[in-house]
Image (tube, rainbow, N blue to C red):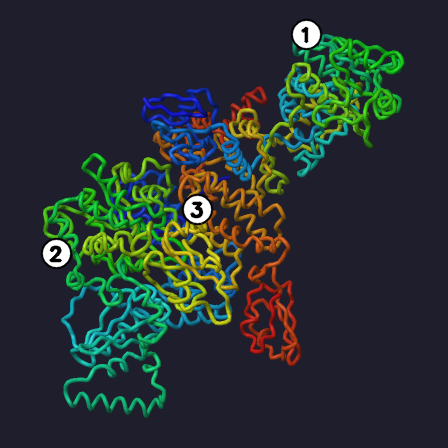
């Protein structure tokens, strides 16, 4: 047996085993992309780097191929090692042509997975689509009417003709749900036994309450007005929001367990100290007009509003948080909702004794602007019809069919493998900045017209697993590295199609692909659309 | 939509595939025959037609994926037909600093080659950049087919093409070899002509044949002898006339038209009649031609003059022993100079361990760059179990600005064979390979001829120098990939794969070619072996420094007065090499830095010129010995541009396997490109430095690990120049985007600049001061060079 020391712990492995095996034996997580148990180590991705020390050596080596030798001393979790791995990942992303998440998803302050919602609507899976919306958006009915829809400005379809009518689809879902008597909201987490007071029932306060209710906490909402809604009531007054919609959302909160104490004024009927005796935390969401009141309660102000820690939402008073326009004037309802949602998350972490922080922004590779040629590649598949305008039926907004048609216009420019991608996962873990290295971007390409496999060369990290698997299976054509250096690409001999190269091990290669470079067409459709008709991609 | 793996090619009706079978018959059907087969196809078709590749797969064990991978990896393979003539523009270091980019630009402009293409619309010429033609003292160099054009300038572009067309018409079918085996009887007069490929680039082969013709006409008693490299590249073609009892006479810069005169001058025919006829001819010549000046006398070179003495006096010739006097292919002459003496002794002693002891005691370290102790390497291979072991001579010298190995292979093929045979005895190998770049055709031909000669005498093959000890040596030609100089990539290439390195260990010494223990030594290392065994390890160790023993061969080039190939003891200082041997930089210029070690090396600034040239001292200042390119830079060199130049080379030559090298070097180059066009950002310098360190640490093989060295050393010594570029200034006025051309009031309105401007950026205004349209100006520098009044300024 061979004994090596990794991160000051010693471990024994069989002769011939790698440092990666040894580290995994110790339960240490070392990222790998080009490693595959059936393949000889390719040592190409270099994200499994560890540092060899001792015996006068001090160098980084790929753990996947370095054979353990007796007495080796290895560091696998130091800042230096992490930095090297992060740099490797950042270099890979600097040459990664594709977005993990679509621009609309990234732009949405509430992080709604819009392409997923649209796929679900297109497939007629309305319940799932509604769930997708509800998970991201605290008061979905309200955004359907009042959202400024920044998502539509980022929509890639817009560079072709008009952006997808995302807000209309979202409104369709919320309206349909509100009309459904049987739809009863349920909490996502069991009761925690903790209680939080939210002062102010505008969009920020309601969103905070929504988040905390789902987390299992008891929430008491306090407002000095006799009716809840804060600035939303102004929107009702102006005719921009039907009062029934606001009422329905408030009812939902009540059904989730929210208790409203209306016509109660902080400072007069209640004191902060009193609240803190009864509640584990207090959230101030008094709106822009609440600054003077907050100051009188002993909260520190800064020019924009109540001074808070930007990351936690905590004010200068212990256990007191603030959100919404009382902190910084927010002109868009969706931003107030997002701020409330985030502070709700932070409060929940505070109650759970975790590091207090907002919802981390999900990682995404960034492709940037597309050239017209590239947009055309995305147009293979989506419905070429122009943007649907809601008809004038009895209900406002889209009918079911209109919503489906409009959803089918989505380009699905998010990655088919998002959420099932090692590269993306490690990027999250290592805090990768995908834009660290600037350089000319390669054109976006995808090959999806022929056969069952979709190939996106721009997402390939050249791990070579598919090349090796094809070789082992003695594929008649197989795959090959083509070119040299920065220009190396995976290709099929004699300029043939990817399916011709992978006649025997296509499935295995797709499964082994560490990124979204190789995807099965029907599998993607089955998962995402709920049907496996080859129709979608082959649609004229 | 199709995957763009190989470019579209003509249909099968246009390609005669009969040749494929011939190529397969010669190279074999095994997977490892793929490179030789592709080389034959490339040679035959001028590119690789897809149909031919398919046919190869049908007729051999080579898989489609393998042939695709290999065919697209190596530089020499084209996938589209080229023009009828290939113009190779040298991109070596010396050529770069003397303006090769501008020459290429001017050629493309003259030939009307559209952007994104390398061939003119009539398919007459294809312009190809080439890493290094090894004619550094002629820089910038352009080679069209076999014709070399030195000191090329942008404004000469049209002239070069015209001259090539004329020469082709004049010299069609005139092919004479310089590679024949010949042993001539001793003669009263011997005329030695250096026939290394750089001498030949300057026309020494034409001179050689002209001298032979003249000698033949003059009668017997005179021998025109081919010799190897003479080292004095700055004076080639160099001719030595050796006569019994007289000291030799030397001539530099002779042309074929001087041949008769040289022969007449040194050779008195025996008979009175012939002598009178000669006198009559000479008189007649003088009358008719009225040449009062004697061109031959002007070419005479006094070897005792200060310059040649300074060039030669510090040199010690071990690897280049008998340089300039040996016929590279004359085996008997080699034997007469103690050749194969060392090998014979080793064969008779039958004591491999002692050979290794000797090498170890000599302190010899690998001359390929990293400087690993050779004896230790030999011992590791020798200690490996198993009967099958291999020896490989690494002649894949690819550094721009380095041509030591080529010169050694061309000039001393028997010496390298002897070194290899001794190493084979020491480690127990019975098979060996010379891996030589295909860009070195002369070296390949000479080694081939030498191997054939040895085999013919029964000294190689089943027996070695008549001893019952088999040793088979063959040549593998590289197909154009700098990375194949790396041991594991070289082996991959020998096995018929893409030249991609793998992680070491296991080292080739443990598991190399076909998984067997393999000794890979550089050409120069092997060239030193016979000397060490003949003179003893102590004699070798007496030269050099504590950690670096013996001598090192350098290619001295760049902004230096006397460039050439030199061999000096380790520990000689940079200043001694540049100032004494090289004669310093041009008058009026200042030494700025010396680039040592090529793309893996670094720039040593002038204030560290007293640094000793040995492995450890160079490493301490951030450079490396490398294979021995030594490029002198004067104050006109921009250090950011130099860093970019080397990085562009390694980035282009990266195999593309590991992330740090494939993408990291590209991102470093992106930053340098931005700096050189004035689009750098303040944080770019720090990011460049951080990334350089990451690439060094994280790359898999030596190429990637050392690629950042030119950047790191210039950042270390010339950070202010980087900062100036961020501020939009190029202190050396080299970076085209950061300079402007202006015509001052010295302009007389002579219109020469307007006539010569290739892009019509100067309106013609006779007798009035001219102006330059900066939007049109491409900064080609032509106007400044042609102006007789120094009226063109760069600012």
Q: Say which of B291 and A318 sits in front.
A: A318
Q: Say which of B500 and B83 sits in front.
A: B500
Q: Is residue B570 left or right of residue B584?
A: left
The nearer-to-camera label among 1 and 3 is 3
Alpha-carbon neighbours of circle 3 within 10 Å: few (<14), some, or many (≥20)? Answer: many
Q: Which residue, given by chain and number where applicable, does mark 1 sit on?
A: A191
The reply to whether residue A449 is in sight is no
Residue shown at 30% from the left, 53% from the top: B549
Separation of marks 3 and 2 at Cα, in angstroms: 44 Å
What's the mark number on residue B457?
A: 2
Q: Is residue B560 above or below residue B684?
A: below
Q: Quadrant of the N terminus of chain A?
A: top left
Q: Which subunit holds the residue at mark 1?
A: A
Q: Is residue A159 above or below residue B610?
A: above
The reply to whether residue A498 is in sight is yes
Residue shown at 27% from the left, 43% from the top: B376
Q: Which subunit holds the residue at mark 2?
A: B
Q: Position of residue A471 (x, y in %)?
A: 36, 32
Q: Which residue, given by chain and number where applicable, does mark 3 sit on?
A: B706
The nearer-to-camera label among 3 and 2 is 3
Separation of marks 1 and 2 at Cα, in angstroms: 96 Å
Disc 3 is placed on an element classified as: helix
Q: Which subunit holds the residue at mark 3?
A: B
């Amino acid at each position: 047996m061979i004994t090596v020391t990794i991160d000051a712990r010693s471990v024994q492995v069989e002769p011939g085993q790698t440092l990666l095996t040894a580290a995994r034996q110790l339960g240490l997580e070392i990222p790998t992309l080009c490693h595959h148990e059936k393949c000889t180590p390719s040592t190409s991705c270099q994200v499994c780097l560890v540092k060899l020390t001792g015996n006068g050596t001090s160098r980084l080596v790929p753990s996947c191929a370095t054979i353990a030798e007796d007495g080796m001393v290895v560091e696998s979790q130091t800042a230096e090692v992490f930095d090297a791995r992060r740099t490797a990942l950042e270099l890979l992303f600097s040459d990664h042509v594709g977005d993990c998440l679509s621009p609309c998803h990234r732009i949405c302050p509430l992080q709604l997975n819009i392409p997923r919602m649209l796929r679900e609507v297109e497939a007629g899976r309305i319940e799932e689509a509604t769930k997708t919306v509800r998970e991201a958006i605290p008061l979905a009915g309200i955004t359907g009417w009042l959202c400024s829809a920044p998502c539509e400005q980022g929509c890639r379809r817009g560079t072709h003709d008009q952006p997808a009518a995302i807000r209309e689809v979202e409104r369709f879902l919320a309206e349909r749900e509100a009309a459904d008597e049987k739809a009863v909201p349920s909490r996502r987490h069991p009761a925690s036994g903790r209680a939080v007071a939210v002062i102010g029932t505008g969009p920020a306060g309601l969103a905070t309450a929504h988040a905390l209710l789902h987390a299992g906490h008891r929430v008491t909402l306090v407002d000095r007005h006799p009716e809840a809604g804060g600035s939303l009531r102004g929107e009702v007054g102006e005719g921009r929001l039907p009062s029934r919609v606001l009422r329905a959302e408030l009812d939902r909160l009540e059904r989730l367990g929210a208790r409203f104490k209306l016509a109660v004024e902080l400072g007069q009927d209640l004191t902060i100290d009193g609240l803190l005796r009864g509640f584990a935390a207090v959230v101030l969401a008094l709106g822009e007009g609440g600054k003077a009141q907050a100051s009188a309660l002993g909260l520190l102000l800064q020019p924009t509003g109540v001074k808070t820690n930007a990351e936690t939402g905590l004010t200068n008073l212990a256990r007191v948080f603030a959100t919404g326009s009382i902190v910084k004037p927010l002109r868009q309802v969706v931003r107030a909702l997002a701020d409330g949602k985030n502070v709700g998350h932070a409060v929940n972490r505070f109650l759970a004794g975790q590091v207090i922080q907002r919802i981390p922004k999900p990682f995404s590779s960034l492709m940037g602007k597309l050239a017209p040629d590239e947009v055309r590649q995305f147009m293979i598949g989506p419905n070429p019809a122009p943007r649907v305008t809601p008809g004038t039926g009895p209900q406002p907004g889209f009918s079911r069919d209109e919503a489906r048609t409009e959803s089918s216009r989505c380009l699905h420019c998010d990655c088919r493998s998002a959420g099932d991608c090692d590269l993306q996962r490690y990027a999250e873990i290592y805090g990768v900045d995908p834009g660290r290295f600037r350089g000319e971007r390669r054109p976006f390409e995808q090959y999806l017209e022929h056969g069952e496999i979709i190939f996106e060369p721009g997402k390939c990290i050249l791990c070579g697993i598919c090349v090796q698997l094809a070789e082992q299976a003695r594929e008649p054509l197989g795959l090959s590295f083509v070119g040299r250096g920065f220009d190396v690409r995976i290709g099929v001999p004699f300029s043939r199609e990817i399916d011709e190269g992978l006649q025997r091990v296509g499935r295995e290669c797709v499964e082994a692909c560490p990124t979204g470079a190789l995807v099965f067409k029907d599998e993607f459709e089955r998962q995402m659309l709920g049907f496996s008709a080859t129709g979608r991609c082959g649609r004229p | 939509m199709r995957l763009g793996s190989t470019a579209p090619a003509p249909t099968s009706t246009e390609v005669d595939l009969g040749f494929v079978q011939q190529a397969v018959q010669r190279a074999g059907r095994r997977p490892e025959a793929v490179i030789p087969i592709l080389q034959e196809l490339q040679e035959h078709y001028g590119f690789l037609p897809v149909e031919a590749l398919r046919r190869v797969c049908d007729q051999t064990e080579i898989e489609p994926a393998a042939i695709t991978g290999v065919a697209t990896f190596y530089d020499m393979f084209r996938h589209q037909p080229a023009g009828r003539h290939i113009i190779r523009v040298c991109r070596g270091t010396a050529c770069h600093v003397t303006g090769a980019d501008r020459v290429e630009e001017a050629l493309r402009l003259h030939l009307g080659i559209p952007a994104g293409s390398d061939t003119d619309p009539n398919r007459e010429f294809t312009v190809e950049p080439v890493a290094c033609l090894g004619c550094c003292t002629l820089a910038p160099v352009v080679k069209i087919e076999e014709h070399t054009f030195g000191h090329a300038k942008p404004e000469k572009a049209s002239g070069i093409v015209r001259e090539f067309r004329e020469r082709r018409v004049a010299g069609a079918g005139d092919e004479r070899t310089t590679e024949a085996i010949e042993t001539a009887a001793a003669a009263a007069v011997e005329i030695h002509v250096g026939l290394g490929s750089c001498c030949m680039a300057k026309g020494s082969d034409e001179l050689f044949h002209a001298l032979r013709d003249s000698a033949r006409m003059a009668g017997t008693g005179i021998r025109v002898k081919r010799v190897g490299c003479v080292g004095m590249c700055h004076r080639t073609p160099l001719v030595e006339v050796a006569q019994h009892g007289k000291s030799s006479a030397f001539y530099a810069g002779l042309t074929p038209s001087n041949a008769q005169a040289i022969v007449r001058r040194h050779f008195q025919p025996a008979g009175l009649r012939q002598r009178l006829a000669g006198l009559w001819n000479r008189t007649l010549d003088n009358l008719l031609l009225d040449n009062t000046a004697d061109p031959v006398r002007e070419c005479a070179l006094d070897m005792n003059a200060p310059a040649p003495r300074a060039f030669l006096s510090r040199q010690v010739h071990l690897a280049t022993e008998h340089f300039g006097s040996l016929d590279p292919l004359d085996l008997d002459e080699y034997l007469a100079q103690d050749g194969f003496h060392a090998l014979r002794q080793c064969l008779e002693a039958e004591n491999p361990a002692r050979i290794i002891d000797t090498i170890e005691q000599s302190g010899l370290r690998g001359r390929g760059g990293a400087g690993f102790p050779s004896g230790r390497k030999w011992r590791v291979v020798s200690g490996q179990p198993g009967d099958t072991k291999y020896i490989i001579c690494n002649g894949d010298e690819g550094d721009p600005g380095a041509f030591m190995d080529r010169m050694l292979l061309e000039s001393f093929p028997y010496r390298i064979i002897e070194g290899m045979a001794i190493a084979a005895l020491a480690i127990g190998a019975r098979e060996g390979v010379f891996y030589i770049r295909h860009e070195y055709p002369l070296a390949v031909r000479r080694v081939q001829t030498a191997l054939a000669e040895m085999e013919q005498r029964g000294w190689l093959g089943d027996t070695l120098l008549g001893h019952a000890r088999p040793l088979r040596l063959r040549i593998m030609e590289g197909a154009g990939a700098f990375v194949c100089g790396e041991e594991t990539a070289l082996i991959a290439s020998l096995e018929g794969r893409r030249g991609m390195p793998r992680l070491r260990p296991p080292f080739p010494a443990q598991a190399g070619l076909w998984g067997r223990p393999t000794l890979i030594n550089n050409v120069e290392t092997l060239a030193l072996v016979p000397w060490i065994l003949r003179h003893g390890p102590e004699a070798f160790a007496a030269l050099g420094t504590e950690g670096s023993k013996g001598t090192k061969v350098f290619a001295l080039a760049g902004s230096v007065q006397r460039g050439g190939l030199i061999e000096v003891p380790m520990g000689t200082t940079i200043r001694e090499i540049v100032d004494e041997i090289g004669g310093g930089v041009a008058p009026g210029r200042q030494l700025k830095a010396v680039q040592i070690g090529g793309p893996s090396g670094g720039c040593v600034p002038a204030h560290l010129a007293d640094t000793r040239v040995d492995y450890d001292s160079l490493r301490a200042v951030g450079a490396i010995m490398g294979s021995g390119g030594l490029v002198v830079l004067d104050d006109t060199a921009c250090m950011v541009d130099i860093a970019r130049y080397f990085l562009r080379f390694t980035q282009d030559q990266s195999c593309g396997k590991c992330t740090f090298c494939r993408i990291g070097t590209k991102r470093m180059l992106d930053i340098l490109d931005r700096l050189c066009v004035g689009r750098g950002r303040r944080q770019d310098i720090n990011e460049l430095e951080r990334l350089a360190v990451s690439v060094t640490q994280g790359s898999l093989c030596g190429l990637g690990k050392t690629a950042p060295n030119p950047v790191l050393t210039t950042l270390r010594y010339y950070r202010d120049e980087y900062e100036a570029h961020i501020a939009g200034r190029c202190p050396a006025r080299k970076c085209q985007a950061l300079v402007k051309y202006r015509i001052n009031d010295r302009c007389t309105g002579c219109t020469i600049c307007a006539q010569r401007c290739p892009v019509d950026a100067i309106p013609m205004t006779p007798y009035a001061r001219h102006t330059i349209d900066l939007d049109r100006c491409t900064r080609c520098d032509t106007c400044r060079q042609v102006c007789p009044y120094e009226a063109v300024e760069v600012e």
